[in-house]
Each structure stands twice: as C-alpha cells, then as structure tokens.
Image (cartoon, rainbow, N blue to C red):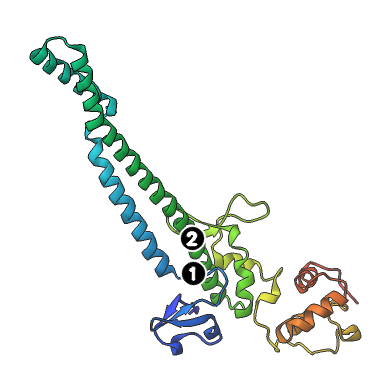
Amino acid sequence: MKMKIKASYKEKTDIPDGYADLYEEKDGKWILTGVEGIKNVEALEGTLKKERDARKAAEKESAKWKKLGDRDPDDLLKLEDENAELKTRVESGNDEDAIQKRIDAAVAREVNPLKRKLEEVAGERDSALEKSTELSAAMINSKIDKALTTAASSVKVQGSAIADVLMHRGKFEVTEDGKVVTRADIDGLTPGLDAESWLSDSKESRPHWWALSAGGGATGGTGGGNQNGNPFTSRNATEAARLVGKDPGKAEKMAQAAGFPTVRDAMQAMARPKAKNA
C-alpha cells in the first residue's frame, strides 16, 4: 500500500518517517509548512467562503433594485414626470414652472439616490469577484502542490527534493472534475498525466530526486574507474547519485569541476542514452 502524507496531523508521532521536519505545530495540530508554495488549505477555504458569502450578500442587495425589470432608472424618472404633470394639470392647470419643479424634486428624491445605490452595490460586487478570483488561483496552486507532494511521497522521492518537484507546478492544471493532470498546451509534455505518472516518467531524467540505495551491486570507486575521485568526470552515474545523496554540496563542486554548470545538468547528461564502453 502506497504511503501518502497529509496536510496536517493531530500528533507529531502520526507523521511518516522522514517528513517530520516539513511540519510545524499550530493550534494543537501539526501543519505541513516546510515546503515552499504549500499553504494552509483549510485557511484558504475559510477565507474563500467568507468572500463568497460577501458576494452573495452584494448580489442579494442588488436584486432588490432589479425589480424594475428591464427598465433602467430613467424609466422611473419618466413615470414620475407623467405623474407630476397629471397632478399639476389638476392642481394648477398647465403651469410649466410647477411641472419642472415637480420633475426636479422627483429626480432629487428618487432617481439620484437609486443610481448611487446601484453604483455602490456594483462596486461591492466587483470587489468581491476580484478577491474570489485571487483566492481561486491560490486554491488551484495549493491543490496542485498537494497532489505533487502526495505523489512524491508515493513514489519515494527524497524529502529534500520536494521543493524542486514543486517548481514544476506550472506544467499542471486542475480539470473541471477536480483532477490534477499535466497540461496540453506545453510542447514536449504528455498531456493528461496525473502527478504520480509524471514523476515516474521523470526517474530517468531526474534520478537525483529519489532516495539512493547502497545495494544493487554498486561497488564504490572500483570497477568503473572513478577518475581522480570525481564520478562526474568518469561519467559513473551510480557513484554520482550516491555522492548527491551523501553530500550535495560536494557533489555540486565536483560536477562543476567536471565541466557541468550544475549537478542537475550532470545527472541529466549521464541519464541520456550513451554508447557502450569496452
């Protein structure tokens, strides 16, 4: 059965071996905070709920003003004009000054406050929508990071390499049904892969992500010829991987001494198909 880590645990002893350093105690629980880009999903969801509630309240308030139907506030002004004119005719004949005064009063009393209220509600709605969009983006990134972290645990990626794995979150998207898969708009990337499948396909090009083993017939510096003690110079992938796991700083310096910009470049170069040696 595959091991998966969670975003939080009640007790520190519940955290899987090798991952305790990635958690921090908060409010009586151990929360996953040691990975760059991982956020408290529960807190994000709570904040998003507040923003959605605010947007619903704004829309409810706006609905009160939609009782005018398809008419705009000018329709109300026309009705007030007609009413004022009829009243004026009854009360004072066709006095145009009296009619204009009633029109001005109707505008000041009804239409202008209505317009101001509609503008205020529209502003609150736009603000709520903007905040909701920002939180949705944060939720998507957090969901992708969680999927990558869980998949990395399942395929036994080293804990120290998870931050490097998360740098590839831009290759993933969240589908309408909530699945995290590789995107279809990136050249050279197989679309529709889940995080675990993508990681499995990366073993050959990124072997330094995985925990190293002293077994498998490795014999240290003998047999393969570790020239000058530098496995990157002799292209000894087994010894190079062992060095990366044991002393990353030393491995970085030795890779550069062998002519590679970084350890990653060296490991990728050694992982490519090569001619058979005698």
- Circle 1 packing at 10 Å, graded few (<14), some (14-19), many (20+), is many
Q: Secondary structure at mark 2?
A: helix
Residue 127 in sight in this render = yes
Q: Residue at x 62, y 56 (%)?
A: 190
Q: Position of residue 95 (x, y in %)?
A: 17, 11
Q: Position of residue 271 (x, y in %)?
A: 76, 70
The answer to whether residue 190 is above or below residue 247 is above
The amino acid beneath tag 1 is: Lys
The answer to whether residue 275 is above or below residue 2 is above
Q: Which residue is mark 1?
A: 39
Q: Earlier in the sequence, mark 2 or mark 1?
A: 1
Q: Check residue 138 in the rendering and tell me which mark sits there, or answer none.
A: 2
Q: Residue at x 73, y 82 (%)?
A: 248
Q: Are discs 2 and 1 less than 8 Å apart at CB?
A: yes
Q: Residue at x 70, y 76 (%)?
A: 208
The amino acid beneath tag 2 is: Ala
